[in-house]
Amino acid sequence: MIELFDPSSPDEIDPSDPDEHEEAVRPGPLWRHALWVAGITVLGVGLGWATALFRIGPEEYGLPSAALGAVWPYLVAWTATGLAVAAALRAAAARVPVYAAGRIAVVLTALGTRLSLGWRPEAPVLGAMAAAALTAAAIWCALALRTTSRT
C-alpha cells in the first residue's frame, strides 16, 4: 500500500513549521525509521572517532596513544551499540513523544566511541559500557512512556 502525504492531516509532522515541538510522535514507514537509526548511529560513531583522533594518531599529532591495539573492533562494537540505542529511542518515539531522542542517541554513542578509542578497554569493560548506554536509553524511553501514560 502506498502512503500519500496529506498536508492537512494532523498525524503528519511539518518540519518547516517553527511552532512544531521537538517532542512529538514520529510516525512513518519502517524504511524512514531504519534510515534515521542508521544516520544517527553513523553520526555518533563519526563524532566519537573524530574527537578521539588526537589519541589514535602518532605522537606528533597530540598526546601519546593511551593504549595500543586495533581501532576497528571498538568502532564495530559501538556501531552495534549505537544501532540498538537509536532503534530503542526511535521505537519509543514512534508511539509517544520522546524529548531529544536523536541527541540522546548521538551523545551516548559518541561518548562510548570516544572513551573506547582513547582507552581501549578489555571486552568485559566494553560490554559494561555498552550495557550502560543501552540502560540509559531504556530509562529515557521509560520516562517518556510513563509521562505520556499519566496525561
Image (cartoon, grey):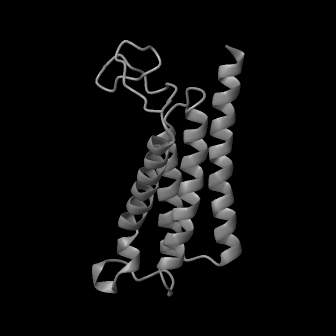
**Rendered residue at 50%/29% (across/down):** 27
In this view, 75 is above or below 69 = above
Residue positioned 69% across, 64% down in the render = 128
Closer to the camera in the image, 96 or 8: 8
Q: Quadrant of residue 53?
A: bottom left
Question: Measuring 32% from the left and 77% from the top, which residue is drawn there?
Answer: 62
Does residue 49 sit above or below 149 in this rendering?
below
Residue 98 position in % (x across, y down) = 55, 31
Q: Does residue 65 lie above or below 131 as drawn? A: below
Out of 88 and 4, give the one closest to the viewer: 4
Tell me where residue 138 appears, x and y as whole percent: 67, 43
Total labels drawn: 0
Q: Residue at x 65, y 21 (%)?
A: 148
Query: At which x and y percent is residue 8?
Result: 37, 12
With respect to residue 19, does 32 lie above or below? below
**Quadrant where the image shows the C terminus:** top right
Instruction: Out of 20 and 33, give the one closest to the viewer.
Output: 33
Q: Image quarter for residue 146? A: top right
Q: Is residue 103 visible?
A: no
Residue 141 seen in the current view = yes
